[in-house]
Image (spheres, helix red, strand yellow):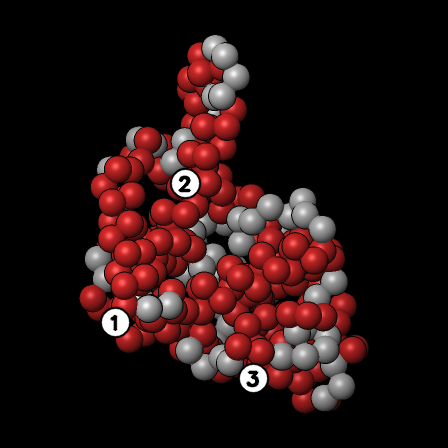
Amino acid sequence: MLWADAKKARRIKTNMWKHNIKFHQLSYREMEHLRQFRRDVTKCLFLGIISIPPFANYLVFLLMYLFPRQLLIRHFWTPKQQIDFLDIYHALRKQSHPEILCCLERVIPLISDAGLRWHMAELCTKIQHGTHPAVHDILALRNCFSNYPLGMNQLHALQMKALSRAMLLTPYLPPLLLRHRLKTHTTVIHHLDKALAKLGIGQLTAQEVKSACYLRGLNSTHVAEDRCRTWLGEWLQISCSLKEAELSLLLHNVVLLSTNYIGTRR
């Protein structure tokens, strides 16, 4: 399966080179395949590096057996492990949700517009009391996330660390690299969203829908397919309404839209 993925990724990259196609111009499935393959290759490279010393390969086999979630890619997980590991990863990213909401509450006094201050306070209160926010509640705040105090370039180090954990990215990097990784990751998701809106959610298989929801912050392993499609539709409404300067809202949307969705595990 990994070899087949590698051949498909090579075909896509070759076609991009021949026809001078940029990543954001690819179809949704091609874009998603390259994104996932890069993550898989990163894990494989790490295993390859630690296998270089003489006789280290014996230790590597032991480590893979003891730590399959950390060292093995999804192709080598059993169906039960896939569910269990996705639950573990979601529990890890959900730990950062209260911190992110607290950061949003702390910046409310810094918002110059009184109406936006009220909207932000109302949204935080709703989420903390277990209410799933409507799309228009989130989009009403887009101006707060395009510049100070919540624009991508204005986020402080603690906020970026918490957001990195929510996106399952390592938070153990200098602030400059954290900001770059968050920008890159969010931009890729935004490109995927535009391609998915063009394709149509109805064209996705059940597994593709659940994978798309999980990438965007929803623990879809325990949510019915129809609810996943509804949630993904709400996400796309927000994402496709945003400009590049407003992508900090898309980044925070991983928490805002997923925390209280019906059917998700607590």
**Label 2 secondary element:** helix
Identify the disc placed on residue 28.
Answer: none
User: Residue 241 placed where, x, y %?
Assistant: 45, 81
Quadrant of the snapshot with the N terminus: top left
Say what amino acid the circle numbered 3 marks.
Ala
Between label 1 and label 2, give the one nearer the viewer. Answer: 2
Spatial CA distance of label 2 from label 3 is 39 Å
Upstream in the sequence, badge 2 or badge 3? 2
User: Residue 40 placed where, x, y %?
Assistant: 40, 41
The residue nearer to you, when weighing 232 against 74, is 74
Q: Is residue 239 above or below residue 14?
A: below
Residue at the spot of label 2: 41
Between label 2 and label 3, give the one nearer the viewer. Answer: 2
Residue at the spot of label 3: 140
Say what amino acid the circle numbered 1 marks.
Leu
Upstream in the sequence, badge 3 or badge 1? 3
Residue at the image position 49 percent from the left and 46 percent from the top? 90
Say what amino acid the circle numbered 2 marks.
Val
Q: Is residue 250 above or below residue 168?
A: below
Residue at the image position 79 percent from the left and 77 percent from the top? 109
Spatial CA distance of label 3 from label 1 is 27 Å
The residue nearer to you, when weighing 216 against 14, is 14
Q: Check whether the beta carbons of the residues at disc 2 and disc 3 lie within 8 A of each other.
A: no
Residue at the spot of label 1: 199
